[in-house]
Amino acid sequence: MEGLRLRSLGGAALLPAPRRGVNRLRARASVRGGVGQLAVTIDELRLARDDAGGAADGHAVNGRAQAAAAVPQEGTGRAAAEKLRAVADAAADRAEMHDIIGRQRDNWNHLLLHSTNSLTLAASAMAALAPAAPGTVAALKASAGVLFATAAATMAAVNKIQPSQLAEEQRNATRLWRQLERDVSYRAAAGAVVTDADVQEAMDRVLALDAAYPLPLLPGMLEKFPKTLEPARWWPKRQVKNKPAAQPKAIINGARRGAMAGNGWTQDLEDEMRGIVRVLRAKDEQEYVTTGKLVLTVNRGLAVAGPVLAGTAAVAAAFAGPGEAGSWASGAAVLCGALAAAANTVEHGGQLGMLFELCRNVAGFYRKVQEDIEACLDEADVDRRENGEVFETKVALLLGRSTSDLRQFGEMASPSFRDEDIKDFAGKLF
């Protein structure tokens, strides 16, 4: 039957009223003797039924409700992108601030070094002249004592704040803030959807950097003579995921080897990365921690010796004058003053504080490489990791090596390989 004829006008009321602008239901109607005739095909009735079923929520599916639902999502993404750009602006501003303050504190180191040495040497000269000038011995003694005391107080203050170490902190902070700015700016301009998780990650990096390299001098300054040397940490702590219950080692290794078939990862590459982590922890990081402890010990000794020698010279200068006792006191003042100037020159001219901070930062750099590799390897699903070949290239660049150089570390991932047998360092950059 080609169609269904309805002889009643009331039959037309059974059909849903067509929506404005929609012409899916085509009908042929004719009027015979006041009775309406409507011809509708079966297919058209089915279309009409489908439209009737969706009429109740037609706006919610295809109308304004759908557009309204999309607006909040789009608005959320736009707001997250704006927040990310705000983080990038803040990072750029922080980098400029650290750069300016770093230059200022580097100037402090040079100016205070030369000023303190000038005070000490001038006081030593006056103490040496005191026995030979009976008429002006009181003035020379007083001048030498005041200059020695001023030099001792200046040395104590400078040794407390370590300007060369402060300058190194700001230099490293400037580099890291600029790196953060580049990362965030690239993320915001890449065209991908920015989520609140991206914003939170960037904020965590900002707070970690602020804590690692504070701007204020007092209070908030980092401890310049810590009891133990810990590698610097300027990145957020990684959240440890809840690991599943322990499984037999054979099953885990078998599943892992079976998963090493995609996304650029192989079992050899994973062993290579585990070997690099082991070498970084056993050799590179420990090398800089040990060197930093040695520099810290020497710097602490000089920081105490300088003010003590200058103070001793100030006391000896009070007894300088004519006679044998006065000559001995004058000689002691001159000797202590010269030694104080030498200690101050070695400490701040050699920038031992900067060397200590450099060791902390390099040890922290190697610690971060370790944690990045471990975070990547902890992801059991290789498809969710970063591409293995790209990751290997990044690690090679961070360590100052070629990708072919990294293959030698694969054998060091074996438990049978002892730490004492590790001869080479993983990093060649520092």
Image: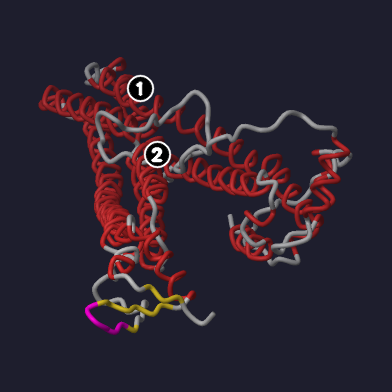
Residue 47: image location, x then y, percent: 43, 71
* Closest to the observer, 70 or 92: 70
* Closest to the observer, 345 or 183: 183
Residue mark closest to the camera, 2 vs 1: 2
Specify the quadrant that holds the C terminus. Answer: bottom right
The residue at which mark 1 appears reads as 308
- Can you see residue 30? yes
* SS label for mark 2: helix
Tell whether label 1 touches label 2 (CB within 8 Å): no
- Can you see residue 78? no
Vertical side of 277 occupied by 313: above or below: above
Residue 247: image location, x then y, percent: 80, 32
The Cα atoms of the two marked residues, 2 and 1, are separated by 32 Å
Q: Quadrant of residue 23?
A: bottom left
Give the magenta part as a residue range.
29-34
Looking at numbered disc 2 in the image, what kind of residue is underneath it?
Ala
Relative placement, left or right, of 129 versus 332 is left
Looking at numbered disc 1 in the image, what kind of residue is underneath it?
Val
Residue in the picture at 29% in, 60% down: 59
Q: Which mark is residue 212?
A: 2
Vertical side of 3 occupied by 292: above or below: above
Vertical side of 122 occupied by 256: above or below: below
